[in-house]
Image (cartoon, rainbow, N blue to C red):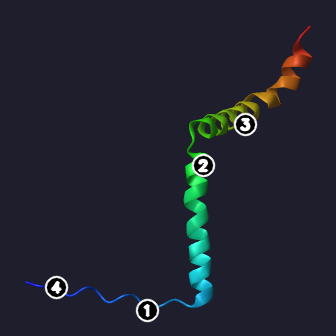
Amino acid sequence: MSTSPAAPPPAAPAFTRVRTQAAGAVWPRLWQALSHPLWTAALTMITAAAVVAHLFLPQLPTALAADP
């Protein structure tokens, strides 16, 4: 039983093809760079610091004012 290869999809316009190739080249490299353990640790620490600041810093002026 032989199967014929599927017909290639119709060619996209040149501007779409160039844009897709450019985007396809950037995102994998960016994802690979951000998945490095040091970047992961840095982004995790920045996120944790932002969450802690959001949760606890609004209470700081009240706590300092109540301190004798």
* Disc on res. 40: none
Question: Of label 4 and label 3, which has the lower sequence position?
Answer: 4
C-alpha separation, residue under disc 2 versus residue under disc 4: 41 Å
C-alpha separation, residue under disc 1 versus residue under disc 2: 34 Å
C-alpha separation, residue under disc 1 versus residue under disc 3: 48 Å
- In the rendered image of this protein, does residue 55 appear above or below residue 9? above
Question: Of label 1 and label 2, which has the lower sequence position?
Answer: 1
Q: Which residue is mark 3?
A: 50
Q: Quadrant of residue 20?
A: bottom right
Badge 2: residue crowd in 10 Å (few <14, some 14–19, many ≥20): few
- In the rendered image of this protein, does residue 23 appear above or below residue 37? below
Question: Of label 1 and label 3, which has the lower sequence position?
Answer: 1
Q: Which amino acid does the dot numbered 2 rest on?
A: Ala
- In the rendered image of this protein, does residue 63 appear above or below residue 4? above
Badge 1: residue crowd in 10 Å (few <14, some 14–19, many ≥20): few
- In the rendered image of this protein, does residue 56 appear above or below residue 50? above
**Camera-side mark, 4 or 3:** 4
Question: Of label 2 and label 4, which has the lower sequence position?
Answer: 4
Question: Of label 3 and label 2, which has the lower sequence position?
Answer: 2
Task: Tell me if label 1 and label 3 are in contact, CB under 8 Å.
Answer: no
**Residue that appears at 71% across and 32% down:** 49
* Disc on res. 3: 4
Q: Which amino acid does the dot numbered 1 rest on?
A: Pro
Q: Which amino acid does the dot numbered 4 rest on?
A: Thr
Q: Which residue is mark 2?
A: 33
Q: Which amino acid does the dot numbered 3 rest on?
A: Ala
- Give the percent coordinates (x, y) of residue 3: 16, 85
